[in-house]
Image (tube, rainbow, N blue to C red):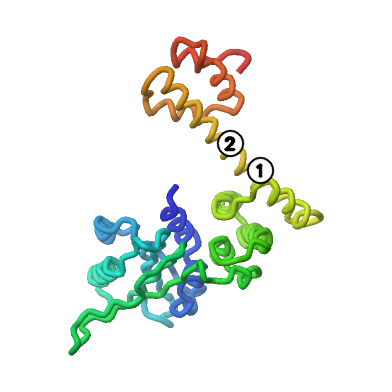
Amino acid sequence: MSHDQTFKNLILDYPRQALAFLAPEEATNIDQASIRSLREERKIARLGDRFKALDVPLEVSWPDGRRAVVLFVVEEETETRKFSIHKLAVYCLQLAEEMKTDRVVPVVLFLRRGGFRTHLPLGTEFTTYLDFRFLYRYLPEMDATAFLASDNLVARLNMLNMRYSPAEKLRVYHAAQTGLLTLEADPEMRLKYADFIEIYCPLNDEEQRRYREEFLANNPHQEGIMGFTSTIREEGRQETRIHTLQRLLEKRFGPQPASLQERLAAASAEQLEAWTLRILDAASVEEVLQTSPDD
């Protein structure tokens, strides 16, 4: 899954926390607000045809009427050099026209280092005709240790992409793990974002050893953290087994139908190992994948 999609999922799964972290200037009383993704509206889906990678549009309303409806356009940029303030401005103007409102807040999350424009004035030396700005979070320059105890799960997870010293890596990793366990009750969501942690802050063997010794000994969250990380690593190993076997089958027997991927994905680790051992002697793919009492 791409970085763009990973962060879109994070924003859609935790919209209140995302807006509170990304746009605190505008996210006042966000806990009392109702939030829906405008991607659910067919009318708005047309806006994505030209700028599919750009946005997560959210409509935020307050049932008690304390604020008028606000549309937030949230964009994540992994490669800062690809950011276009012009495209963002065009998209916001299109969205404002479609939704018949001027209350649009553009927000950009920058994941990697690089320069970018924060202001787009259109005009001449005599007059400015359009003055476009946006809110942004530039993670490489944010101090991760400032969010170690945050009760905002989006902030706790995004510490991993902020600035911290090598000596602070395990501390930041642990804060993200414990934040996930204490701030998210759903086991499936925990597993989903434990994967996020492993992607953006992987530990090598030595770091894993130190982490267990320094942070998990006698820790009440030890079982939960170790359970998630073990599951994710086993899933990663399983994906590697599937990919390796598929490549070997194609090299030996030529291109294979898409249904092969589904069949391999449904197999156990033991089946994949047995099938891999048969490749050199088998005369066909079906002979490789046949089920035997030993599988």
For the residue pair 187 and 49, the one nearer the viewer reads as 49
Q: Is the residue 234 above or below the residue 41 in the image?
A: above
Left or right of residue 234: residue 261: left
- Taking the spot 43% from the left edge, 50% from the top edge, the residue there is 2
Judging from the image, what secondary structure is the residue with disc 1 in? helix
Amino acid carrying label 2: it is: Arg
Left or right of residue 192: residue 181: right
Judging from the image, what secondary structure is the residue with disc 2 in? helix
- Taking the spot 41% from the left edge, 81% from the top edge, the residue there is 67
Q: Is the residue 230 above or below the residue 51 in the image?
A: above
The quarter of the displayed image where residue 142 is located: bottom right
Task: For marks 2 and 1, give the CA distance.
Answer: 11 Å
For the residue pair 38 and 95, the one nearer the viewer reads as 95
- Residue 269 seen by the camera: yes
For the residue pair 146 and 40, the one nearer the viewer reads as 146
- The label on residue 237 is 2
Q: Is the residue 276 above or below the residue 56 in the image?
A: above
Amino acid carrying label 1: it is: Ser
For the residue pair 2 and 150, the one nearer the viewer reads as 2
**Residue most extreme to the right:** 218
Position of the C terminus by quadrant = top right
- Where is residue 223 drawn, in percent x and y? 73, 49
- Where is residue 105 drawn, in percent x and y? 36, 74
- Where is residue 93 drawn, in percent x and y? 25, 71
- Residue 99 seen by the camera: no
- Taking the spot 46% from the left edge, 80% from the top edge, the residue there is 25
Give the residue pinned by disc 1. 230
- Taking the spot 31% from the left edge, 69% from the top edge, the residue there is 85
The 10 Å Cα crowd at callout 2, few under 14, some 14 to 19, many 20 or more, is: few
Q: Indicate which disc, 2 or 1, sits on the residue closer to the N terminus.
A: 1
- Where is residue 263 drawn, in percent x and y? 47, 26
